[in-house]
Image: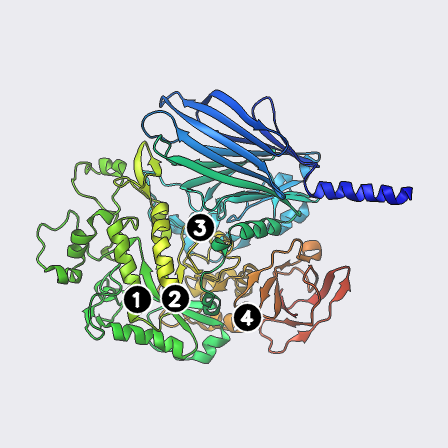
Amino acid sequence: MKHKVYLLLVLLLLSLQCYGVNEQINIDNNGNVKFSLINTVIEINDDIDNCRNLQRQIIQSDNNKIVISKLLYNDNLKSSLRLLEEYTKSSQGLHCDITIQGVSDGSWSMPILSSFRFITNKKDSLRYWTAWGSPNIDTLNMNASLRNQLKEYKGGCDAAKGWAVLGGEHNNRWVDPLVPVSFSDSKYYYGATGFQANDPMTGFVPAQNDLFAIPMAVIIDEANHEGYSIILSLKDIIIDLEMETKKDGTISFKRLWNRISQDSTLHFSYDIIRHSDDWRSGIETAYKMYPEYFEPKNDIAYKICGTGSYSASKKIDNAEKLRAMAFGVNWQASFDFPYMGMFIPPVEKNEAWETFGFKANVTKEATQTLDRMNKISKEFKDNGFYSLSYFNVCEFGTGIVSPPPATMTLKDKEAWKDANEFLYRNLYNAILPMTKELLKNNNKENAGYPVPYGTWGGAVAMDCGDSAYSEFLIDQAQKHIEYLPDSYGICIDRLDWLRMFNDQADDKMTWYSGRPARSLYNSWKTLMKKLGPTMHNAGKVIFVNNHTRRIDLLNEVDGIFDEFTYMGNSMNLMALNCFFKPALGWVDIAKTIENEGGDQFIQRHLYMGVFPMCPFLGNDHSIRPSTYVDKYYLDYGKMMQMIKGRKWVLIPDVIKVENNTAKANIFQVEGGYVVPVVLGENKNCRVIVRGIGKIHSAKIYYPGEVKEIEIRPKKEKGKLIFDVPLVRNCAFIKIEK
């Protein structure tokens, strides 16, 4: 009887630990909040940079909740604010709400900090992970196994050597982004490097490794087999965000350019969630908290996915070959609209206009009609493929002049025929102006009109947060729905402009460089609240070319068609925004694949669940058919077909290659799972799959081989163990449930 009572007490204690009874929150002598767990203490500090504490009041402090009110003061600006911190224990960890209210007159901004120091009984066992381009690593603190997992695979992009915007040869590589690393002194930027008023870096490309795509960090305590995630709310008003790590186990987030004033209240929140010792558990948690940012709004996006093209082609010459290459969708690069932004002009279905592509010397098509535009989409549809129409919300016009033209000659109803007249009559306030610093440098600070940033085809950059321009774009979307019924939706180009600020507008949320401004991140979110439902309610999809890799921009986005996937860091960032969305990746030229090696190139795409661009006739500044690349796409075509509609499996410790002699990932697909095993070092490897339950059968596919091979895994305590022969360093396992 005594033994039974003792056993019940042990089980009760374990149960209480699971539900967090042994977790405590308290405040230390320095005012830091400490979240104490079984093997770890997390020291938390929320603060405003460059401010001193005038007053601190502990409103509530018990084992379930701590509320602290602080009065902070900035000596340089002679401004003060009230900071309210609320820390509440939850069943999974700790939730924090931050409220900031200006006390002084006027508006100002200082970085808003949230810092977390992880203190464990076995410090050297700590690792961290985020959705990065690739990790900053300290090779001196890495064992041979970890060093091998993080080895660089050289890319094939010749342009990286001389094209400064790509960041140089250092970024012409691929490193596995799924490996947690030791803490080091490092800095990362959310989605894109920060905008600078005197050096705007127009044409930004996300090729560097020090970017992260989701505002979160996962901490793995390997020795104690524990994991924790810090997840910032995706609903917060994040303008610019930086993340810093330190060797001592500290992770800090710095929010920039949020306006502090008496007239508005700032709210931020985050969660610290404990889970198993796997980064997948962190992503699973973030997904469950914010599913609308991870999932497509329209499930037809899964059917659209596959290898893609960016072509003006009007005719499908070899549909069977394209199907064998897993072709799915063409993003229309015909540029057959009158000019950038005027995608559907106010004309009858068969009324012709001169095309933007012809004016800009991009295409040979001189005229176009709405009826012929739709027929191009129908050609793809009739062959079992899909098409997306070109769309752009940050660029407008062709041959735009500055200053504005002195006279306007067209009648109002005909103003659309001239890009300058339409822009300056109707969308004047939407022009994204150069910053005051740039105007001063160019002796144009007293120009008296918005001096625009020029872009390709003689267009200018635009702020989609302007109300008149936003209404115009929604009208364009509605016209697309009406006049292009055989197009499956739109793909929005050039989101690199979103990292800019409009310092001649005011969104009431931004304070940039000492003055009010409108962040184009906020402009985008405002527009998408209207544009998203407009398209989705009509059964259409929205894809984007998201040069800025931020998941908080993807609430109304169904998939990504990225322009720089042939750069390894860019591919990783895009893929890690697409755990449950289709990811289509750009390939610039065939030579890039030849330089890298076709097997390596295709295999890392399979590993990351990304469809490489298809070699397609008429592709615009992208890969065309060639004997070399066509062979690889055909050799791997069946594998790429089988990952259509894939979703990442986020079960902890779900996939492992014994001794890390190859790389393997697992995706859920209709009817089961697929496991790409790639970049193998030996002729064979052992793949271990956990947590997927009973299976019906499993087959292996190899590149360039027609027949599949049935494989029977060993079953051992919830594990499936596959002994896998490799061909060309690769095997592809299809598991049927």
Give the CA distance from mark 4 to mark 2: 30 Å
Mark 2 and mark 3: Cα distance apart in space: 23 Å
What quarter of the picture does the C terminus occupy? bottom right
x, y percent for residue 224: 71, 41
Kind of residue at badge 1: His
- Residue at left offset 28%, top offset 66%: 479
Placement of 467 over or under 379, stated as above or below:
above
- How crowded pointer 3 is (Cα within 10 Å; few <14, some 14-19, many 20+) is rated as many
Amino acid beneath label 2: Lys
Decide if residue 341 is on the left or right side of residue 534. Answer: left
Measured in 3D between alpha carbons, the distance from the residue under mark 4 to the one under mark 3, in whole angstroms, is 28 Å
Tag 1 residue: 480
Residue in front for this viewpoint, 434 or 539: 539
Q: Position of residue 662 (x, y in %)?
A: 65, 59
Residue 65 horizontal/vertical position (percent): 59, 33
Which quadrant holds the N terminus?
top right
Q: Are marks 4 and 1 in contact (CB under 8 Å)?
A: no
When asked about the image quadrant of residue 735, the answer is bottom right
Marks 3 and 1, how far apart at CA:
27 Å
Q: Total label count?
A: 4
| Residue for badge 3 | 549
